Amino acid sequence: MKDAFAEGLTIRQLKETDIDQYNELLSYVFQVTGADIEESGYANKREMIQSKRPILVLSTVFGWFDQEKLISQIAIYPCEVNIHGTIYKMGGITGVGTYPEYARHGLMRELVSVALRNMRENQQWISYLYPYNIPYYRDKGWEIMSDKLSFRIRDTQLPKFVEVPGNVERHEVTHSDVIAVYEQFSRINHGALQRSAFHWEEYWREDNPAERTAAVYYDKEGQAKGVLFYWVAEEVFHVKEMFYLNQEARNGLWNFIGAHFSMVYWIEGDSYKNEPIAFFLDDSQIKETISPYYMARIVDVEEFLKDFPFESFKKPFHFVVTDPVAEWNQGVFGLKWNEVEERVEVVREAIGEAVVLDIQTLTCLLMNYRRAAYLYQVERIATDRQTLRILEEIIPDTAAYFSDYF
């Protein structure tokens, strides 16, 4: 950043009194329209802005100021996520924006650096964000971690009815059984957000209240095992999200959708599991669109590796990592298995063979968005064949599930 341009500009953490400037910048950057406000169920723009106050209060927000005017900002949303069965603190990046007259001067890159240091201080070893521009965030160390699958099927293509011992009940989306099923689901699904009451509030914040219904599947013992969020409008059954603990619950929820056969022509929705639904249908000639959804970034390589649930391995090796922003992630990270404590040990020295990669690829690898063999094939990692086999064996082969938005 040029000194002449930087004169008079300062970085500081935002306070609650900055809420109006925070939201005005967001509104400008993301062009919030009257239609957006109406669709979200808010009476006016001020009500929508007021609804965002809790994010600013609970998050850590840093901004560049020109005198007293906020000109660029980034927010860190405190979360916890499941990484292959281990719960990590996660910093969710949101509220990113810069006024156009201040763009292309390196302001955001500096804010990203400040945000990464803050997350590191708060032991948030990983960060998620929703990318409005994938190359932009790749340049700063984030990489795709999960996909969203959007589908559209005709009523005649619905799965056949499957006899199940349980039943489905409709509830408010805040029902305790809804929350309980998701809590169980998020504990056994890699990538999933551990939703607090505030996260649930954020999950529904921009949805129309009229489009909030939960169908809950109960097994024969009366235990809730699956949830479907949906609404029906203009002869279309809309699936917002479906999560379940077993196949019985999945079948029960699809039976419930099928019960709307006489009411709808189409079923449309989104799925966040790495599992195209076409195979689940007898008539698989449907349209499914897979698009990148969320990105992730390892904030502190050494600490993230220490907690990562690797399978045991005999031969030590080391990562050689490059990071465009976080200098503490630059360099060598040796891994060896501690047989006594049954966990990995991380040392800052070159032991065994090298695995050379950047922070984006390391994140992709450990989040299991792509396997080591594929990353080797496309020359995103450099190593020998034996170490490549070790990576294939010790990293859990489970796709990330993430359905939230912030």
Image (spheres, rainbow, N blue to C red):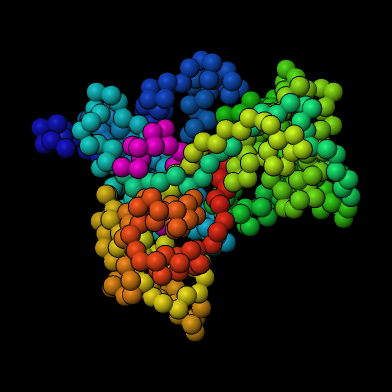
Query: Does the stretch in magenta take in 135?
Result: yes
The image shows residue 390, relative to residue 278, as above or below, that is below
Q: Residue furthest top?
A: 34
> What residue lies at 72% left-to-right and 48% top-to-bottom?
244
Which percent across, then down, holds residue 61?
37, 41
Residue at coordinates 88% horizontally, 53% vertically from top-left? 220
Is residue 212 visible in the rendered image? The answer is no
| 305 in the magenta segment | no
The residue nearer to you, when weighing 120 against 65, is: 120
Examine the image and state in which quarter residue 273 appears: top right
Query: Residue 3's x, y, as percent?
Result: 11, 36
Magenta stretch: give its range.
125-139
Residue situated in front as seen by the camera: 233 or 250: 250
Residue at the outermost left position: 4
**Residue closest to the eye, 275 or 91:** 275
Left or right: where does residue 349 sit relative to residue 277? left
In the rendered image, the quadrant that contains the N terminus is top left
**In the depicted structure, whether residue 115 falls above or below residue 201:** below
Total number of numbered discs in the rendering: 0
Q: Quadrant of residue 151?
A: top right
Is residue 12 shown left or right of residue 285? left
* Rendered image quadrant of residue 157: top right
Q: Which residue: 28% across, 66% down?
A: 332
State the image coordinates of residue 21 (x, y, percent, origin top left). 36, 28
User: Who is closer to the viewer here, 86 or 163?
Assistant: 163
Task: Give the residue furthest to the bottom.
Answer: 340
Residue at the image point whose x is 78% and y is 33% from the top? 158
Give coordinates of residue 15: x percent, y percent: 37, 39
Q: Is residue 245 visible?
A: yes
Q: Is residue 232 above or below residue 377?
A: above
